[in-house]
Image: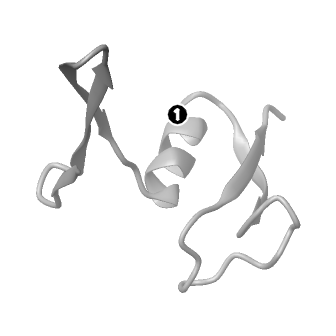
Amino acid sequence: MIEVDPATQAMSSNYVDVTGGRGVFRSIPFRYVWPSELDLMAELAGMRLRERWADWAREPFTGESRKHVSVWQKP
């Protein structure tokens, strides 16, 4: 099960592992970021965006893309 909070961009993936008749629950929290946020962080670190694709096959990144591969470089 995945829990999402759009206001804080927080997500949590929850899992139950069953081994030997015993269940163990684990929750993995993380925060997602938008490409524009990553661009700003890179800029603040002195880098610039060199390329961005929608996937590893280098398909064009568009507003419909659900993932991205971004490459930043230090000038």
Q: Is residue 1 above or below residue 66?
A: above
Tell me the kind of residue under disc 1: Leu
Q: How many marks?
A: 1
The one of 57 and 2 positioned closer to us in this rendering: 2
Q: Secondary structure at mark 1?
A: helix
Tell me: residue 63, above or below residue 52: below
Q: Residue lying furthest right in this view?
A: 57
Residue that protrudes farthest toward the front in the picture: 21
**Quarter of the image with the C terminus in it:** top right
The percent coordinates of residue 72 (x first, y second) are 75, 43
* Residues packed near mark 1 inside 10 Å, few (<14), some (14 to 19) or many (20 plus): few
**Where is residue 20 shown, x and y percent of the image?**
30, 14
Which quadrant holds residue 43?
top right
The residue lying at 51 percent from left, 46 percent from top is 38
Of residues 25 and 44, which is closer to you in this image? 25
Rendering quarter of residue 46: top right
- In the image, residue 75 above or below residue 1: above
Say which residue appears at 71% left-offset and 70% top-offset. Answer: 54
The quarter of the picture where residue 15 lies is top left
**Residue at position x 56%, y 50% in the image:** 39
Residue 3, image x, y percentages? 17, 51
Rendering coords of residue 67 (x, y %):
58, 64
Disc 1 marks which residue?
A: 44
Q: How is the image coloured?
A: one colour
* Closer to us: 40 or 55: 55
Residue in view at x 15 percent, y 49 percent: 8
